[in-house]
Image (tube, rainbow, N blue to C red):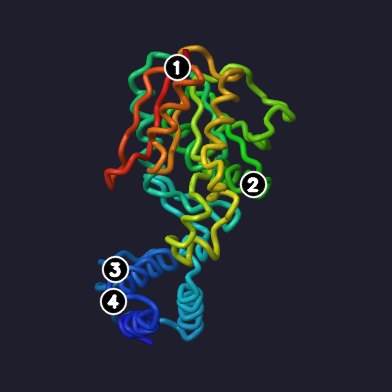
């Protein structure tokens, strides 16, 4: 089958589930990830003959997409800024909001004179935060932890791919007192903890609900700030005075988190909006 005909065929299959625009975007991504063909390549190589075996492989991918399986899990690949990361269903797919979070931390690091700064990411998932920061700030000492052994394996794989020396360790931050922490004075604590309330599930799409790990997404409506409280408590012992803490947050709780952090001894609290003008990032200083 000619590539041009296969492209039309795959798009028609996807139209049974998705809109015209969504179908085109997905087919473009499939060709990019499977054959490394850009949109330009698809035009220039439109008369290329695709084998029957390859056609079947493409159709299997489309069938999985029609079940709402994220394309990132199908190809075990997710782009995060200028990184290509391995992901599977033991980790969340990195979001644009988290890109904004690490860029905010990067702005701070670019403005500081400390070269041997120590950073810890709590609840690292795929490792997108520490891998990006370690790749850009070679003199930083970067640590990362997660409650999931499988997630840590994914994060380690991503660090190894970029030849980065990151100290990964197992930690349930809600019971951090029971664990051994490999460093006692961090300059920066960063976390994108679970912050979607259970009651918000009804607003989420099937590709998230059916495939991404619940424990990395959801918190009880009765205690939605549980992770922020515990990480702030963790910082009393493990964050240096004058050290920074950065959070990604639920847009609904910016003010509550600000009040919480004031009560727990933080100052210079700033709340930043994301690309969609929603409260998304908190930055604060331990005093």
Q: Which mark is residue 115?
A: 1
Q: Name the residue under label 2.
A: 153
Q: Which of marks 4 and 2 is in front?
A: 4
Of labels 1 and 3, earlier in sequence is 3
Distance from the alpha carbon under mark 3 to that under mark 4:
21 Å
Of labels 1 and 4, earlier in sequence is 4
Distance from the alpha carbon under mark 1 to that under mark 2:
28 Å
Of labels 1 and 2, earlier in sequence is 1
Asked whether disc 1 touches disc 4, contact meaning CB atoms under 8 Å apart, the reply is no
The residue drawn where x is 59% and y is 20% is 238
Distance from the alpha carbon under mark 1 to that under mark 4:
50 Å
Q: Position of residue 11 (x, y in %)?
A: 34, 80
The residue drawn where x is 41% and y is 32% is 136
**Label 4 environment density (alpha carbons within 10 Å; few <14, some 14–19, many ≥20):** some
Distance from the alpha carbon under mark 1 to that under mark 3:
43 Å
Q: Which mark is residue 41?
A: 3
Of labels 3 and 4, earlier in sequence is 4
Of labels 3 and 2, earlier in sequence is 3
């Amino acid at each position: 089958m000619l590539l041009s005909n296969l492209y039309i065929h795959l798009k028609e299959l996807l139209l049974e589930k998705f809109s015209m625009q969504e179908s085109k975007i997905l087919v473009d991504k499939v060709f990019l990830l499977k054959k490394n063909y850009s949109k330009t390549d698809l035009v220039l190589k439109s008369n290329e003959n695709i084998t029957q075996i390859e056609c079947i492989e493409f159709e299997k991918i489309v069938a999985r997409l029609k079940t709402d399986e994220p394309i990132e899990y199908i190809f075990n690949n997710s782009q995060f800024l200028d990184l290509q990361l391995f992901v599977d269903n033991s980790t969340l797919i990195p979001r644009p909001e988290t890109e904004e979070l690490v860029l905010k931390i990067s702005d701070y690091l670019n403005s500081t004179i400390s070269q041997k700064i120590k950073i810890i990411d709590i609840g690292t998932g795929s490792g997108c935060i520490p891998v990006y920061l370690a790749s850009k700030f070679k003199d930083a000492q970067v640590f990362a932890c997660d409650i999931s052994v499988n997630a840590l394996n994914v994060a380690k794989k991503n660090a190894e791919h970029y030849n980065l020396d990151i100290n990964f360790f197992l930690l349930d931050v809600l019971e951090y007192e029971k664990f051994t922490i490999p460093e006692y004075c961090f300059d920066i604590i960063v976390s994108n903890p679970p912050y979607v309330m259970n009651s918000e599930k009804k607003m989420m799409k099937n590709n998230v609900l059916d495939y991404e790990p619940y424990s990395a997404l959801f918190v009880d409506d009765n205690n939605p700030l549980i992770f922020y409280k515990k990480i702030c408590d963790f910082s009393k012992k493990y964050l240096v005075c004058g050290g920074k803490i950065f959070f990604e947050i639920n847009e609904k709780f910016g003010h509550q988190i600000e009040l919480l952090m004031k009560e727990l001894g933080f100052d210079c609290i700033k709340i930043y909006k994301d690309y969609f003008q929603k409260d998304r990032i908190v930055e604060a200083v331990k005093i």
